[in-house]
Amino acid sequence: MLDTLKTYLLYGNTYCGIEHNSQYTIEAILLQKKKSEVVIDTSFVAKNIEEIAQHLPKKQHAFLIVNNDAVLSKYIESNEKQSNRLLFEAFPNLKIKDFYYEIDSHGSFHNIAICRKSTVDKLVEVYKKHNITIIGFSLGNAKTSFVNDFIESPTYYTSNALLTKEANQITGISLVDTIPEQSYLVNGLEVKNTQLLTFAGALSYMLKSKNTSSNFDEEETKLVEDFHQKRFFSQFLLFGLGFILLLLLLNFFIFNSYYSAVESMKQTAAVNGSQKERLLKLKAVVDEKQKTVDDVLKNSSSRSSYYIDAIANSLPNTIQLAELKYQPITKKIKKNTAIRLTQNTIIISGISTDSNLLFNWIQTLESFDWIVKVTPVNYGSQSKTTSEFTLKIEMSDE
C-alpha cells in the first residue's frame, strides 16, 4: 500500500514513451495506470520536440527511445556471455568511453546498438528545457524484448525494422525502409507497429523492469534520482503549502470561534459592568439614605425617650394613661406608599379622677420648653368619678 502511494506521488498515473525514429519523426504515447490495468490514453506524431511539449501534460516524465540515424545496430550470433566481448565482436575499434551501448540477447542471437553519449545527453537536456523529464532511455530496437513475448505472430514490425522470432526468442532483425501499417495485440491492447517501442519504453519504467544490458545504468539512476528530488521538492512544496493553508484555515475557524466567544464575554462583561456600576450607585444612594434614616431614628429615639420620660415624671397619681402615640401616622400604611407622620406631635389618652389635677397637669406640660401647645382633643365622663381625655401635644421643631 505504501509503495503504491509512493509510486503514485512520484509518477502519478500517466506514463509516456517517446521515440526518435529514422523517419525523422517523433512518436509519442501516453499510458494510464488505472488500478491494476494499463490503458492507452493517447498517441501522436510530431516533427520536433516543441510539438511534443505542446501535446504532453506540463512537467511530464518520459522514457526516450533513440532509434534514428545516430544509432548504429548490429545483429550477431555468438555464444559469448560478457557484454564487453560481445560489443568488441560487433564494433572492434569502438572507443567505448564516447558511446552508450545496449545489448538485447536471445540465446546466441544478440542485438547490439550504440550511440554517441553527446547525442543522447543533448536530447535529454533539450527535453529538460521543455519541462519534460527523461528518466530513462534505450537505443535502437533493444526494447522490443519487453513486448516480444506478448506478440503471437512469428514476425512483426517496429518503426524501422522487421523482427522474426522462434519460441518467443528473437532470431533476426532487418532494417526496412518502407514499413507497412500493422497493429498487434499486446496483452489485450491494440498497439500500432510504429508505437511498439514507445509502448515498451513507457511500460518498462511503469513496471520498473529492464531486461537488456548496457553501460548507462549509472546515468539512468542519476536521471531517476534527479527526477525524484525534483518531484519530491515540488510535491513537498505543494503539500507543504496545502498543509500551511489548512493550518491557517483551522486557525481561522478556531480564532473566529474564540473571538466570537470573547466578544460575547466582553458584551456580557460590559453589561455586567454597567449593571454593577448602577448597583454601586444605587447602593451608595441607599447607604446614604440608610445613614440618614439611622441618624433620624437614633435622634428620634433619643428625643422620644426624653419626652416620654418627662411626661411620665410629671403625671399626677390621679391620672392613668391608656395610650401615648409619638408622631402618630396620618393614614393607614399601604404597599408602595410612603408612610406619613404627624411631625412634632404626641397624642395622649387616659382616665382622670380629678378634673382640677388634669388642668394643673396640662399647665405643667405647657411649661416645658420643648412643648409649644397642649390641646384637649376629647374630654368626657366615663362614670360619676372618672373622665376620659385625649390630649394633643405640639412640640417645638428642633
Image: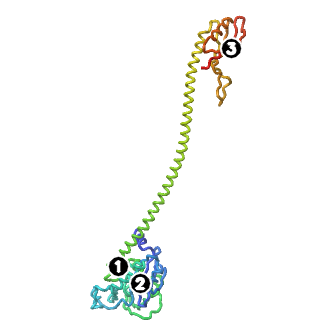
Q: Residue at x 38, y 75 (%)?
A: 227
Where does residue 288 sit, x and y in percent of width and height? 55, 30
| Callout 3: SS | strand
**Spatial distance from mark 2 to mark 3, Cα to Cα?**
140 Å
Answer with mark 2 or mark 1, whichever residue precedes in sequence.
Answer: 2
Tell me if I can see residue 377 in this picture: yes
Identify residue for label 2.
147
Q: Quadrant of the N terminus?
A: bottom left
Where does residue 279 sit, x and y in percent of width and height? 55, 37
Most foreground residue, 291 or 207: 291
Amino acid type assigned to the residue bearing label 2 in the image = Val
Q: Say which quarter of the image contains residue 354.
A: top right
Answer with mark 2 or mark 3, whichever residue precedes in sequence.
Answer: 2
Residue 375 is marked as 3
Q: Say which quarter of the image contains residue 240.
A: bottom left
Q: Say which quarter of the image contains residue 230.
A: bottom left
Horizontal side, residue 131 vs residue 92: left or right: right
Do residues under tags 2 and 3 come within 8 Å of each other at their CB atoms? Answer: no
The local crowd at label 2, few if under 14, some if 14 to 19, many if 20 or more residues have their Cα within 10 Å, is some
Residue 220 is marked as 1
Most foreground residue, 305 or 196: 305
Tell me if I can see residue 155 in this picture: no
Q: Nearer the viewer, mark 3 or mark 1?
A: 3
**Spatial distance from mark 2 to mark 1, Cα to Cα?**
21 Å
Answer with mark 3 or mark 1, whichever residue precedes in sequence.
Answer: 1
Horizontal side, residue 328 vs residue 167: left or right: right
Q: Nearer the viewer, mark 2 or mark 3?
A: 3
